[in-house]
Amino acid sequence: MSGKWSKITIIFVSVVLFTTGIWVVRILSGQPLYVDQLTRGYVEEVAGTDVYTIFRWITELGSGTFLTPFTIVAAVVLWRVLRDWLPATVFALGTLVSHGLNIVMKELVERERPSIFIAANAEGYSFPSGHAMIPMVCYGFLAYLISKQLRSDKQAVLLQWALALLIFLIGISRYVINVHYLTDVLAGFIFGFIFLIILIRVYEGLNVNRGEPSS
């Protein structure tokens, strides 16, 4: 069964990365993406509605103004509660590095946003969405660390699903308030998840090398 799921996972990841690669090629060549063309109507429908207002507030949970102090405070709390510098350091550095990677990718692709909204941290290039990518790493790694400390599997699963929902809502909020195309958000989720997995592997490897259990 594990071998079967491994093959399915590899196929799925390959398809996702291939599709994302096609998006990048089309963006660089100035061609429109059909996914974005098909999903622009919803953004126009919700503009100025309560849905827009709700997502306008949600998007702040992925802004630099919120995530910077949150990451610092969370890192300090992790260090004090777990009495270990490694998880706090990897968490903070991982979040910071994901931000840097996002900037680099945006500069390489140079996709213009559907609209500029400085008050919502929406300026500069668009692909991939930082609000989808960085919270994926920040909240995702936090969920991983906290879940390991919970004695109840149900509590761990509940926490993971809650933070997964938060990550999704933050990312999709950028599409709803019209500062990113939908493909920007999806790409942010994809790249963020890949980096999150790498970060977890690095952390587990460091734990093993210093003689600590990885789970």
Image (cartoon, rainbow, N blue to C red):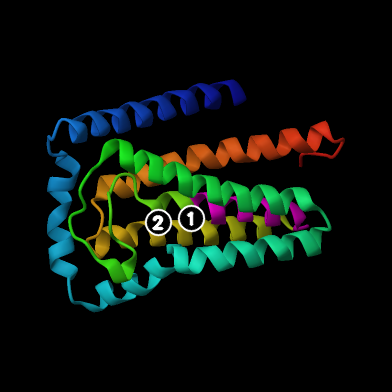
Point out residue 49 in the picture as x, y percentages from the top left corner.
Answer: 20, 77
Secondary structure under badge 2? helix
Amino acid at circle 2: His
Within 10 Å of the Cα at label 2, are there few (<14), some (14-19), or many (20+) other Cα atoms?
A: many
Q: Residue at x 51, y 63 (%)?
A: 67
Point out residue 136 in the picture as x, y percentages from the top left corner.
Answer: 49, 51
Q: Residue at x 54, y 24 (%)?
A: 6
Secondary structure under badge 1? helix
Q: Which residue is mark 2?
A: 131
Q: Residue at x 27, y 73 (%)?
A: 51
Q: What range is drawn magenta here?
A: 136-151
Query: What numbered label is drawn on residue 135?
Result: 1
Which residue is at the front of the view, 190 or 125? 125
**Alpha carbon separation for disc pair 2 and 1:** 6 Å
Which residue is at the front of the view, 179 or 36? 179
Amino acid at circle 1: Pro
In the figure, 149 relative to 56: above or below? above
Residue 5, quarter of picture: top right
The reply to whether the magenta stretch includes residue 13 is no
Point out residue 185 in the picture as x, y percentages from the top left corner.
Answer: 33, 49
The reply to whether the magenta stretch includes residue 144 is yes
Disc 2 and disc 1 in contact, CB within 8 angstroms: yes
Quarter occupied by the N terminus: top right
Residue 30, quarter of picture: top left
Within 10 Å of the Cα at label 1, are there few (<14), some (14-19), or many (20+) other Cα atoms?
A: many
Quarter occupied by the C terminus: top right
On the rendered structure, is 192 left or right of 36?
Answer: right
Q: Residue at x 41, y 40 (%)?
A: 190
Query: What numbered label is drawn on residue 165?
Result: none
On the rendered structure, is 125 left or right of 136?
Answer: left
Tell me if residue 1 can be seen.
no
